[in-house]
Image (tube, rainbow, N blue to C red):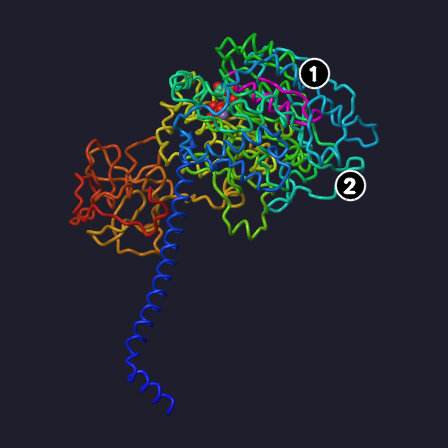
Amino acid sequence: MMRLMKLRRHLRGSGRVLVFVFAASIVWLLFDMAALRVSIDDVNTHILKERVLREREMRRVRATPNLKMEFKHPVQRLDPAAIRDRERPLASDVYREGSKRAVLKDKKDLKRDRFKSVAPQHKADVYNHGVIAKQDAPGKKKVPNLDFGVAVANASQVRANKVVLERDVAKESLHAVASKEKLGVNETIVLESKDLLPSKAMSHQKPNKDPNAQKEPLKPTAHLHVGNISTAVRKSGVHKVLSLDVTHAPRDPNALGQFGRGVILPSSEDEEVRKRWDEGHFNVYLSDRIPVDRAIPDTRPEVCSQAVVHDDLPSTSVIFCFVDEVWSTLLRSVHSVLNRSPPHLLKEIILVDDFSTKDYLKEPLDKYMSQFPKVRIVRLKERQGLIRARLAGAAVATGEVLTFLDSHVECNVGWLEPLLERIYLDRRKVPCPVIEVINDKDMSYMLIDNFQRGIFKWPLVFGWNALSEDYIRKHNITVSDPIRCPVMAGGLFSIDKKYFYELGTYDPGLDVWGGENMEISFKIWMCGGEIEIIPCSRVGHIFRGQNPYSFPKDRQKTVERNLARVAEVWLDEYKDLFYGHGYQHLLDKSVTDIGNLTEQIELRKKLKCKNFKWYLENVYPELDAPLVKAEGLVFNQGLRRCLAMFKDSLSFETCDLNKQSQHFSYTWLRHVRQGDLCIAPQQSLNSFSVVSCDNAKAELRWFHKSSKSTLADHFIAEFASQHMCLEAESRDDSLHLSPCDSNNSFQKWQFTHYYASV
Ligand code: UDP
Ligand code: MN
């Protein structure tokens, strides 16, 4: 107390109160400013984060040229620095000095607007066929020998043949023998349509396993083996995945597009780019200037190069179908397979020319490919379309596994073995590589987000979808685990050849392009197989905004017809969801002839395939697939009573959920239906009756809740030329059609449950 008194006296006496208050305010102010700065920083970080996210999103949108897809391909811009940070023996790590500089240069480029033309960074390289043939002829490569009892050649021999192996692989597991490989003969086979029936080729083969035999429970599949390499010494043992890549040390590290870099051409070349764009619906002009054997970065998750696979994997025939493919992309596709596949596993490469019109795909292609004994060319005598062209390739294939690829791809290092390993483990597995994106404008090789799987939405539209974080955590899924995939994208996959034929191949009634990925996916899953994406196998693909080739018939009609075949054969009662999402017109058989389905339906029975409900419940439970749009009681707002059906007449009753006579459904085909009976207007339009439902009859269809308009609660007659609506008559409980009136409550109806808003 005394001390306080002293203090007060001291302060009052010396007039230091003011000083104290002043000092305190200064301190307070400083604190305040600091706090403010912190929160401004916070805001800035937040804005920055948002901007980064937004830019990333925009980049994805820009980099996703495939307008045919409803949902975007999940690309990431490949940042060489980011890849290097992953501390693994990446392509860029083993590049020569010059190329390292080039990588850094490219990083600088990334800051610029990629689509604005600036001066080129590197001297153009127009590909010289002779050089490649002389230096890199992969047909002359030595075969890696996995039988460890055999004497091995030394590493310099391997390098002399330009097979540069990842250092640790060379050291630990892979030995190359000097023996010359038995190579296939290059040939040109001319096939006609009668040769293409898939059943002919392998019909003698009976399934040796019941496709519906006990399968492992539907859970995330096991890891690729990652283990000690010493086990590889056992016969039929395992070895570390081979990281063969002839392009590790490319001829010209400064060439355009080398190492998967994007190329920005000077604006003076815009015209050239534009002129040649339509040849492939991508930057054909640029592609022609990029080496056909360019290096690309190893984009696999880190653990992949350490994964082990079995020594006695089956061999594969790689089948490329093409129609009027661009020369440089076709060659790049073939070279990527030759340069990055273990030769002993690559039985052959079959090029199926689907009656291309371009001269360069005839003799010049024969001549060019004649230097690679493994390459065979099959020429179709008439245009068959992708599906039947693939079947033609399969019919002549001699490998145990068929690997289908599009003709504008680049297979990445180690792409093949992880696919074959899955088939080795279970021949009913159908593995697909991760499809990375080769940018259609700057030809850069782009990374894909992890954990992507192929899915579809109604009406059978393919798209990509990331596994949810919850799912990943719950099932402990790592970046290299195979991902179960409800549908495959279609272009790139491997399948055991016998199994492919057991499944009845593709429906050969599918034309040109489209829907075949849905067909094979449903068939595989429902008939005992599995589709997986294998993150350790990566293949770049040029996604195009349009098909660059012509369709013999109208494109849209062709795709729709294919999809209708798939729906009719595989979707059971769910096919209404397909038709109900904009394909109702296909139900009119007089307009669309979807062809004969007997064989396909028989096949499904013969294989004892499961039904589509099983597929939805077990493979793709996330899909929203209500069998009807709405159901329950049908309440009329004006009458405040519910519609009821007696025998085949309609009336109104006090609403009662227990009365079956009051239960209706509103279907995907827009019928108001009870059992097999549908509400139908009489000829006069003034009364209504009940008739057998008929999908082809337009007068049975009603729009209801189909828009957010003021007429959403109405039943609008689809067949009437002006807006005519179903109206309840209060005098005699009858029904009639009247011009629609948004305020008339006797025209407003409600079902008890709505499942879809379309
Ligand atoms: N293709 C074919 N015949 C056709 C249509 C396509 O051989 O009638 C080939 C085409 O050249 C390509 C593959 O089939 O190699 C897949 O076609 P596309 O790349 O157009 O399909 P997308 O990748 O757009 O799904
Ligand atoms: Mn393609």
| Image quadrant in which the C terminus is located | top left
**Which image quadrant for residue 223?**
top right
Q: Which mark is residue 231?
A: 2
Q: Position of residue 54 (x, y in %)?
A: 39, 42
- Outermost residue, bottom direction? 2
Q: Is residue 549 left or right of residue 407?
A: left
> Element under label 1?
loop
Circle count: 2
684 and 355: which one is in front?
Answer: 355
In magenta segment, residue 462: no
Q: In terms of image quadrants, where is residue 182?
A: top right
**Magenta stretch, residue numbers:** 327-351
The mark nearer the N terminus, 1 or 2, is 1
Q: Of all residues shown, which one is farthest toward the front?
A: 14
- Viewer can see residue 596: no
Q: Which mark is residue 142?
A: none
Residue 567 position in % (x across, y down): 46, 32
Asked which secondary structure carries label 2, the reply is: helix
Looking at the image, residue 227 sits to the left or right of residue 628; the answer is right
Tell whether position 329 is magenta.
yes
Alpha-carbon neighbours of circle 1 within 10 Å: few (<14), some, or many (≥20)? some
Quadrant location of the N terminus in the rendered image: bottom left
Pointer 1: what residue?
184
Mark 1 touching mark 2, by CB under 8 A?
no
Say which of 139 and 83 sits in front. 83
619 w.r.t. 598: above or below = below
Which-is-in-front pick, marks 1 and 2? 2
Where residue 231 sits: x, y (%)?
A: 78, 41
User: Callout 1, which amino acid?
Assistant: Gly
Query: Does 15 sit above or below residue 503?
Result: below
Q: Amino acid at mark 2?
A: Thr
